[in-house]
Amino acid sequence: MDKNEALKKLHEKWLRECICELRKTATQGVPGDGSAYSPIFFIGEAPGKSEDLEGRPFIGAAGKFLAEMLESIGMKREDIYITNIVKYRPPNNRDPFPDEISACKEWLMEELALIKPKLIIFLGRHSMNHFFPLEKISAVHGKLLIRTWPGLGRQHFLPLYHPAAALYNGGMRDTLKKDFKKIPQILQKIG
Ligand code: URA
């Protein structure tokens, strides 16, 4: 089966079966979006208001900023794959709780196992701390991390600040843009 077709089926299954408590308050689940053949796999935090209404990740202000940064390195949204660690909007966009992250984690692991990206990019601390619980995003943003992860093997990870956090903070915004520009050379380096 084509990988995009398999990915569609994977999302259909989890949209039916995910046991996240946030289903009670969210409008709908927001599955990952993009090409199953992408070498880059972005992981954000959770859907916001626009994403909850439309059922697609990163279509609001943070998504527009992300699209600008992708353009700055000669890429388009269709070239990448993007998903969230939690697939349902938390009420009033509060931080996701550990049990909500846990309820959605198998969904994420299946997306990763199917796509097998070269590089996993964390957007913000929530997705990074799922894989690297002891790291601080302020210390490791823009640095390539390598780790063997069950089900994924030896994997490359790049933590970045979350575009929503950087949108209204000039210093963080400049840092994120600078870190983002490292993506092409990192991809080349890891082959
Ligand atoms: N912020 C996220 O982390 N994910 C989205 O889908 C939108 C905003």
Image (tube, rainbow, N blue to C red):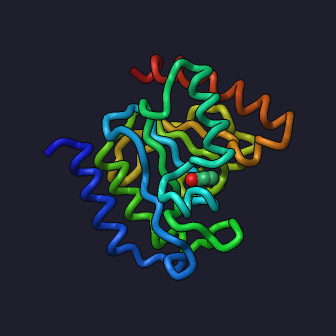
Residue nearest the viewer, comparing 95 with 70: 70
Is residue 99 at all visible to an observer of this figure?
A: no
Q: Position of residue 128 (x, y in %)?
A: 59, 50
Q: Residue at x 86, y 35 (%)?
A: 170
Residue 108 horizontal side relative to residue 123, left or right: left
Spot the residue most to the right. Answer: 170
Q: Position of residue 25 (x, y in %)?
A: 57, 79
Q: Residue at x 39, y 73 (%)?
A: 18
Residue nearest the viewer, comparing 171 with 64: 64
Where, quadrant-wise, is the C terminus in this rendering? Answer: top left
Is residue 54 at all visible to an observer of this figure?
A: yes
Answer above or below: position of 139 versus 113: above
Where, quadrant-wise, is the N terminus in this rendering? Answer: top left
Q: Residue at x 71, y 49 (%)?
A: 136
Spot the residue most to the front. Answer: 54
Q: Position of residue 81 (x, y in %)?
A: 43, 40
Answer above or below: position of 180 versus 65: above
**Image quadrant where residue 90 sits:** bottom right
Residue 121 horizontal side relative to residue 3, left or right: right
Answer above or below: position of 104 versus 41: below
Q: Residue at x 52, y 48 (%)?
A: 43
**How many numbered marks, from 0 up?**
0
Q: Position of residue 188 (x, y in %)?
A: 45, 17
